[in-house]
Amino acid sequence: MRKFTNYDFKSLVFGAAIAAGFVILGSMYSEFLYAFASIGFLYVGYNAPNIKTSALLGAFASTPVMYLALDGVFKEIPPTEQGRITMIIAILIVGMLVSVIGAWAKRSRVKAKEEYEKKQKKGKNKKKNKKVKETTKDK
């Protein structure tokens, strides 16, 4: 049971709901809203602890979209069994890839923040060290 302690299940549920919500809105109003379903998968990947886990969680978060596809929200799915299986695999792959992109973006942002903090500390330490040396020389 300890394996599941560092996952953020709240982000998984919210990300899956966001993706499914945009798919439903896209089927009701305009098809261009389908593209915004990827926001949910990005959110899931961004809050995942690492990239491998984000792929797994992205595939799991795409299950509501798969259910909606099998229910007939996407009208372009062929009614054959092969067409349905192809659509399920495509949805899984898209969910995984977009989630991995979210995890990669988080990793890149964390690295950039660390580098920025490192540069800030170097600059501050130089000024502090000069002040400390000047005060010790005066005494």
Image (cartoon, grey):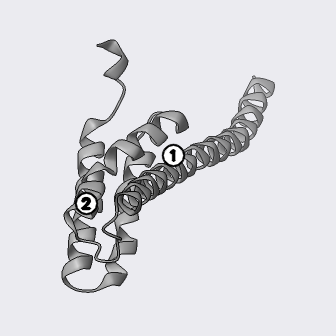
Identify the element where label 1 is drawn. helix
Closer to us: 70 or 24: 70
Horizontal and vertical percent for residue 93?
Answer: 48, 52
Q: Quadrant of the N terminus?
A: top left
Horizontal and vertical percent for residue 68?
Answer: 23, 61
Closer to us: 31 or 69: 69
Q: Residue furthest bottom?
A: 30
Which residue position is annotated with label 1? 103
Please determine whether, in this image, residue 30 is positioned above or below residue 74: below
Which amino acid type is shown beneath numbered disc 2? Leu
Q: Quadrant of residue 31?
A: bottom left
Q: Which residue is drawn at 66% across and 39% down?
A: 121
- In the rendered structure, which disc, 2 or 1, sits on the residue that comes first in sequence? 2
Q: Which residue is drawn at 33% across and 22% down?
A: 4
Which amino acid type is shown beneath numbered disc 1? Ala
Crowding near pointer 2: few (<14 within 10 Å), some, many (20+)?
some
Which residue position is annotated with label 2? 70
Horizontal and vertical percent for residue 11?
Answer: 29, 45
Q: In this view, does 94 lie to the left or right of 63?
A: right
Q: Residue furthest front?
A: 80
Horizontal and vertical percent for residue 74?
Answer: 29, 72
Please determine whether, in this image, residue 3 is positioned above or below residue 60: above
Q: Residue furthest right?
A: 137
Please determine whether, in this image, residue 49 is positioned above or below residue 15: above
